[in-house]
Amino acid sequence: MLEIKNQLELGNIVILGDLGRFRVTVSTGLATETAKEFKPITCIKKAHVRFLPGDMLLDMCKALKYTLYKPDKDDDDEEPTDPGDGGGEAPDPTV
């Protein structure tokens, strides 16, 4: 993992075979007319690490099968709970 980080810091694309590749991209900020006016602090907003999946992951996504989840009968008997309701009664809005 450290070697991947080091290579990305150097501006290299890190290729992990069929798994995919990582690369660094930047979001630009203030544009300048000349290279002399360029200052990284104002011209580059943020750096991002992007992952492009390789053939292995792309093929896996194409082959995925989806089914509808049906809960067990035991799960249907329980009332759904709202963790934010505090377990008590709602306040009376007329008060």
Image (tube, helix red, strand yellow):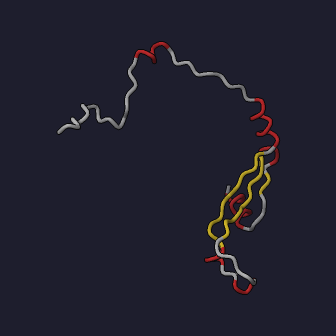
Residue 57 percent coordinates (x, y): 76, 39
Q: Residue at x 48, y 12 (%)?
A: 73
Q: Please, is residue 35 above or below residue 17 in the view?
A: below
Quadrant containing the C terminus is top left
Q: Is residue 93 left or right of residue 77?
A: left
Q: Please, is residue 28 above or below residue 23 in the view?
A: below
Q: Residue at x 77, y 57 (%)?
A: 14
Quadrant containing the N terminus is bottom right
Residue 22 percent coordinates (x, y): 74, 55
Residue 47 percent coordinates (x, y): 65, 64
Residue 66 percent coordinates (x, y): 68, 25
Within the image, what quadrant is residue 24 found in?
bottom right
Q: Nearer the viewer, residue 26 or 95?
A: 95
Within the image, what quadrant is residue 49 found in?
bottom right
- Residue at the top extreme? 73
- Residue at the front extreme? 94
- Residue at the left extreme? 95
Q: Please, is residue 13 above or below residue 28 in the view?
A: above
Q: Residue at x 73, y 87 (%)?
A: 36
Q: Is residue 11 left or right of residue 79?
A: right
Q: Residue at x 66, y 81 (%)?
A: 39
